[in-house]
């Protein structure tokens, strides 16, 4: 269980929900040329370098519950004109987890039903530098015109020893077996087990939470980011195959599909749960 702090709910038009409707943007300059989207240039932005000196203890009221479903069907696909590489889970009841909290609107539950692949990782921790990958679990709730959303992120390190690869990534062997690249997406994938991915989301220590704009255009929605400082491991062959799934005309060859780091001092508060 990860205990997180009070989450706000936002009233906005459905056309601005989480994903941008426009596709005239890319990652070639790491997001520095997104000035056509004013909300990407103002206020608190993600991703950030998380510094312990800027964190404060959380008020433990809200929870993340991982689920242990196996053999879950999903689709690895491009979204936003090829800018995003996402594993969407196609069966409604097979969500990865639930963010559960209560606010002035009553008790709310966000369903986590998609994983964004960032290569390299977007967040850094104590100036350690970016890991080779970051998984961002997207959790949302929709009620009429109301949206509340959370991104739960966990960093991934590259290992040359395939036997050390995390069990979750072992479940994605279909990508390698079929030699999937950007021209073959979308492709259906059955995840045998989420294994240590869910273990990572279940760790109490190392949950850092902050509020910022969505980290891609139009950056119009303020969401919560939960960063778990616990590394998964991915083998070289799967890592290389996932990189081939990125749309080559949308990414920077050096920085991939990651946004440049933003000013962490613009974030009002970075909370940390301490067991």
Image: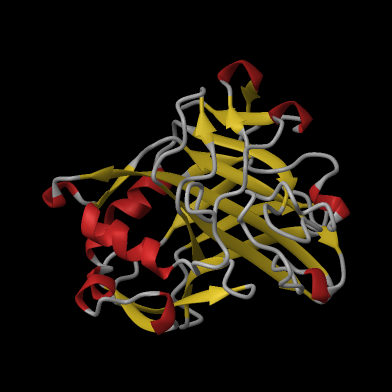
Q: How many marks?
A: 0
Indicate the position of residue 251 as horizontal and vertical percent values. 54, 59
* In this picture, residue 275 sits left or right of residue 21: left
- Name which residue lies at 28% across and 68% down: 172
**Residue drawn 61% across the image and 38% down it:** 209
Q: Is residue 212 above or below residue 82?
A: above
Q: Quadrant of the N terminus?
A: top left
* Apparent side of residue 44 relative to residue 63 in the rendered image (left or right): right
Q: Residue at x 81, y 68 (%)?
A: 146
In percent of width and height, residue 271 lies at 63, 30
Tell me the colour scheme of the image.
secondary structure
**Percent x, y of residue 168:** 29, 59
Residue 29 to residue 173: above or below: above
Please say whether residue 16 is visible from this viewpoint. Answer: yes
Residue 218 found in image quarter: bottom right
- Residue 80 versus residue 220: which sits nearer the camera? 80
Placement of 98 over or under 227, stated as above or below: below
In-front residue for pair 160/66: 160
**Residue 76 x, y percent position in the rendering:** 43, 75
Query: Furthest residue to the top?
Result: 53
């Amino acid at each position: 269980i990860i205990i997180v702090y009070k989450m706000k709910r936002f009233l906005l038009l459905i056309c601005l929900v989480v994903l941008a409707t426009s596709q005239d943007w890319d990652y070639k300059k790491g997001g520095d040329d997104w000035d056509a989207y004013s909300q990407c240039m103002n206020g608190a932005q993600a991703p950030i370098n998380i510094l312990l000196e800027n964190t404060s203890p959380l008020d433990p009221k809200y929870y993340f519950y991982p689920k242990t479903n196996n053999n879950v069907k999903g689709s690895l696909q491009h979204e936003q004109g090829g800018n995003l590489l996402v594993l969407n889970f196609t069966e409604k009841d097979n969500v990865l987890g639930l963010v559960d909290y209560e606010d002035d609107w009553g008790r709310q539950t966000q369903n986590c039903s998609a994983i964004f692949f960032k290569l390299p990782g977007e967040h850094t921790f104590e100036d350690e530098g970016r890991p080779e990958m970051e998984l961002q679990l997207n959790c949302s709730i929709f009620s009429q015109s109301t949206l509340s959303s959370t991104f739960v992120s966990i960093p991934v390190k590259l290992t040359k020893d395939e036997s050390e690869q995390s069990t979750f990534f072992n479940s994605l062997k279909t990508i390698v077996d079929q030699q999937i690249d950007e021209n073959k997406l979308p492709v259906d994938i059955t995840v045998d087990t989420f294994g240590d991915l869910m273990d990572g989301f279940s760790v109490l220590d190392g949950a850092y939470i902050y509020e910022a704009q969505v980290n891609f255009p139009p950056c119009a929605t303020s969401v919560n980011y939960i960063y778990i400082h616990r590394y998964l491991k991915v083998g070289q062959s799967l890592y290389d195959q996932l990189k081939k799934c990125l749309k080559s005309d949308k990414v920077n060859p050096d920085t991939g599909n990651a946004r440049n780091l933003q000013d962490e001092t613009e974030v009002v508060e970075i909370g940390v749960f301490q067991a």
